[in-house]
Image (cartoon, grey):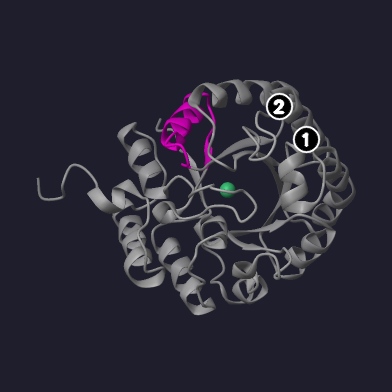
Amino acid sequence: MTRSIDIVEVGPRDGLQNDPTLLETPVKLEFIDRLIAAGVKRMEAASFVNPKLVPAMADSEAIMAAVPRGKCAYIGLALNERGMRRAIEAGCDEINYVMVASDGFGKANQNATPEDTADLLDRIAVLAHDAGIPLSATISVAFGDPFDGEVDVARVAALAARAEAAGVSELALGDTIGVASPYDVARAISAVREAAPKPRLRLHFHNTRNTAIANVYAAVEAGVDVIDASCGGIGGCPFAPKATGNVATEDVVYLLERGGYDTGLDLDALIETARWLEAVALKHTISSALAKAGGFPPKNA
Ligand code: ZN
């Protein structure tokens, strides 16, 4: 039996959030339509943060009101109670709460310590549970912090246990600044599985140091079957200096298809969407390898 890997498309949120080009709502909606046509079934589409701090996400309510329903589950990000309430009100199909693994980034991103983010999740998880909306959590900077440096795997594992206790159905480890190696990935997965065996594990990589595709491979080899990726490899983080884009969705699909995995995504349609992003929507170079090189073997070979 072919093993399936679910890819969560994060381009419309993590991707666009830090892109130098600010897209108008209709262009974002075209991006979302193109992704759905390429087979995307789960997508981060909105972030309910302070629009003054993250202007690219200021139209999150408008996006959620306009997206086509039924073919794709839309995930909204929340960092606090206000965000959680806005995400519920906006009709998100899933909510992703963001924890932090380290103090420096926690202070910059949401003015909270790692333990604060766990305490807050304890208090507000009930809002999503009561609304009947699946709740996931991402532990950001799980592999390294732009201000503090190394992050202790034991601290990540302790936060994972807190997230499990709060009833999250899925838990993501985020390499927010792109420092992880495949060896770190294997270690973190094993520590987190031991501390929090219940939630489904999802991994989130940025390609800042060219290790993201190797990290996807390590995660899949370790049995992980949910991977975050952004079409075109766009993205970054406004609160993490020098962080660059997410691993590109089409690069991940290529890797996995060569390994015989089923992603349910149409590689050609993703490549076409990445090229549309580059030439039409964002009007700057993107980092996706497949958008440059195309798939293999060639269709007419
Ligand atoms: Zn990210």
Work out whether residue 38 or residue 215 is closer to the camera in this orientation and state it: 215
Q: Amino acid at mark 2?
A: Pro
Residue 284 coordinates in the image, percent (x, y): 37, 64
Query: Residue at 63% of width from left, 67% of height from top?
Result: 57
Counting residues from the N terminus, which is met first, the one under dot 2 or under dot 1? 1
| Residue at which label 2 appears | 197
x, y percent for residue 20: 49, 65
Q: In the figure, is residue 212 to the left or right of 272? A: right
Horizontally, is 81 left or right of 178 in the view?
right
Q: Which residues are magenta?
A: 207-227
- According to the picture, the residue beneath numbered tag 1 turns out to be 164
Whether residue 294 can be seen here: no
Answer yes or no: is residue 150 visible: yes
Comparing 135 with 160, the one in front is: 160
Decide if residue 64 is on the left or right side of residue 26: right
Task: Give the x, y percent position of residue 25.
Answer: 54, 77
Image side of residue 132 versus residue 193, left or right: right
Instruction: Let me know if residue 208 is in the magenta part.
Output: yes
Residue type (three-letter) at the residue carrying disc 1:
Glu
Q: Is residue 59 above or below residue 165?
A: below
Q: Is residue 52 magenta?
A: no
Mark identifier at residue 4: none
Q: Is residue 97 above or below residue 222?
A: below
Local secondary structure at mark 1: helix
For the point 86% across and 52% down, the residue is 124
CA separation in Å, label 2 and label 1:
8 Å
| Residue drawn where x is 40% and y is 30% of the image | 1
